[in-house]
Amino acid sequence: MQVFENGKSRPVFATSALLRATYFSPMHEYSVASAIMNTALSAAGKRPVRTLTLRNGALSGVFAESLSMYLEMISEERGMSGMRIEIVPEKARFKCVCGKEYESDTFLSACPSCNGYEREIIAGKECRLESIEVDDE
């Protein structure tokens, strides 16, 4: 069994699927799932994928439940039923003009230090393929 992670084993994961949601639509997660699956299968070559691990930011616009459903559906269509899918939620991180950095699960949270909303988003907008686990040849 081999595990590939961001930049540790293969260069393809240094630039793994960084997918940002910029709009909402009923089939949005399907296209994200399809892109993730294509990236994973391309990197795995002919080896079966055992596990996909993704990080999903609170502000990505990607609904984890829908993404998981579509990934399962696509994996079954491609003959990989039983593949494990792990979606790790990632909180949004902000930097307020007062200098405080803080995390939240929502965009609508005020700075805990000054109660202000003038801030920069520094993390949590991404949905990315973190790693894949494949069988040895």
Image: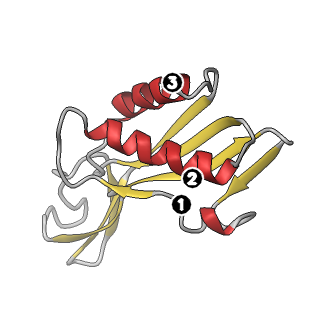
Residue bearing the label numbered 1 = 16
Q: Disc 2 or disc 1, which is closer to the eye?
A: 1
Question: What residue appears at the point 13 percent right and 64 percent down from the top-left corner?
Answer: 117
* Alpha carbons under labels 2 and 1: distance apart: 7 Å
Residue bearing the label numbered 2 = 130
* Alpha carbons under labels 3 and 2: distance apart: 23 Å
In percent of width and height, residue 16 lies at: 54, 60
**Tag 2 secondary structure:** strand
Instruction: Tell me the number on the disc at residue 77.
Output: 3
Q: Inspect the image, locate mark 3, and give the three-letter code of the amino acid beneath it.
A: Glu
Q: Disc 1 or disc 3, which is closer to the eye?
A: 3
* Alpha carbons under labels 1 and 3: distance apart: 23 Å
Residue 65 can be seen in this image? yes
In percent of width and height, residue 67 lies at: 39, 34
Is the Cβ of the residue at disc 3 closer than 8 Å to that at disc 2?
no
Question: What residue appears at the point 38 percent right and 56 percent down from the top-left corner?
Answer: 19
Is the Cβ of the residue at disc 2 closer than 8 Å to that at disc 1?
yes
96 w.r.t. 56: above or below: below
